[in-house]
């Protein structure tokens, strides 16, 4: 089972799309949902979570929409993951070491169960490393990698799509 679920991936993509949308636009929840082929209700819930975390700001009305609350270089992948899923631990130790067949149920020797379980210690270290890496990666870093990977004609496809949708809403 994946530690971070699809909600985290959608949150990362949503903020990436907002970072790539032209500054003069404010994509609507509908546009963001349509772009990722997601149900509108899911996108609205996700945007509410991201807004509560201080990552996006919304404005209401036909011409309203969503913008990043901070510059992409000031938003980390860790913040996005925690906004979408919460600060859940990578590993939950169930103290299996206390339930070994070598001793009676509930009668594990103190030496076998004292201190941090060595397996849990390894998992805590792995989680700390993962959190450090996510905290080092910013939305701007991710956007830069996406732009570098895109072919020249494709490099404006996302901004152009959101600009076109925004222009259509402004006409309404």
Image: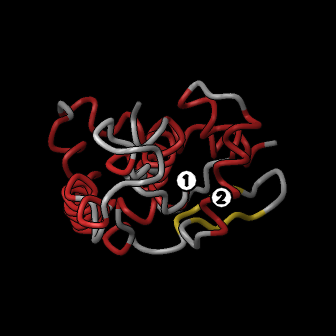
**Left or right: 71, with 135 as reference point:** right
Residue at (64, 68) in percent of width and height: 57
Q: Position of residue 67 (x, y in %)?
A: 57, 62
Q: Verify CB contact (< 8 Å) between mark 2 and mark 1.
A: yes
Report the residue marked by disc 1: 84
Sequence order check, earlier mark of 2 and 1 = 2
Q: Residues within 10 Å of mark 1 (few under 14, many from 20)?
A: many
Report the residue marked by disc 2: 49
Residue 158, quarter of picture: top left
Residue at (16, 36) in percent of width and height: 149
Q: Position of residue 106 (x, y in %)?
A: 47, 52
Quarter placement of the N terminus: top left
**Left or right: 91, with 29 as reference point:** left
- Residue 125 versus residue 132: which sits nearer the camera? 125
Distance from Cα at disc 2 to Cα at disc 1: 6 Å
Secondary structure under tag 1 reads: helix
Residue at (73, 34) in percent of width and height: 40
């Amino acid at each position: 089972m994946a530690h971070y679920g699809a909600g985290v991936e959608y949150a990362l993509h949503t903020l990436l799309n907002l970072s790539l949308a032209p500054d003069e636009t404010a994509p609507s929840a509908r546009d963001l949902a349509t772009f990722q082929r997601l149900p509108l209700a899911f996108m609205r819930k996700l945007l509410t979570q991201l807004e509560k975390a201080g990552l996006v700001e919304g404005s209401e009305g036909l011409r309203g929409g969503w913008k990043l609350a901070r510059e992409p270089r000031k938003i980390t992948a860790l913040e996005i993951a925690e906004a979408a899923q919460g600060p859940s631990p990578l590993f939950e130790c169930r103290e299996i070491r206390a339930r070994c067949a070598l001793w009676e149920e509930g009668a594990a020797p103190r030496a076998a169960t004292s201190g941090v379980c060595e397996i849990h210690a390894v998992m805590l270290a792995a989680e700390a490393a993962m959190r450090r890496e996510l905290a080092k990666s910013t939305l701007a870093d991710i956007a830069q990698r996406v732009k570098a990977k895109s072919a020249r004609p494709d490099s404006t496809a996302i901004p152009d799509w959101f600009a076109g949708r925004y222009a259509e809403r402004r006409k309404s």
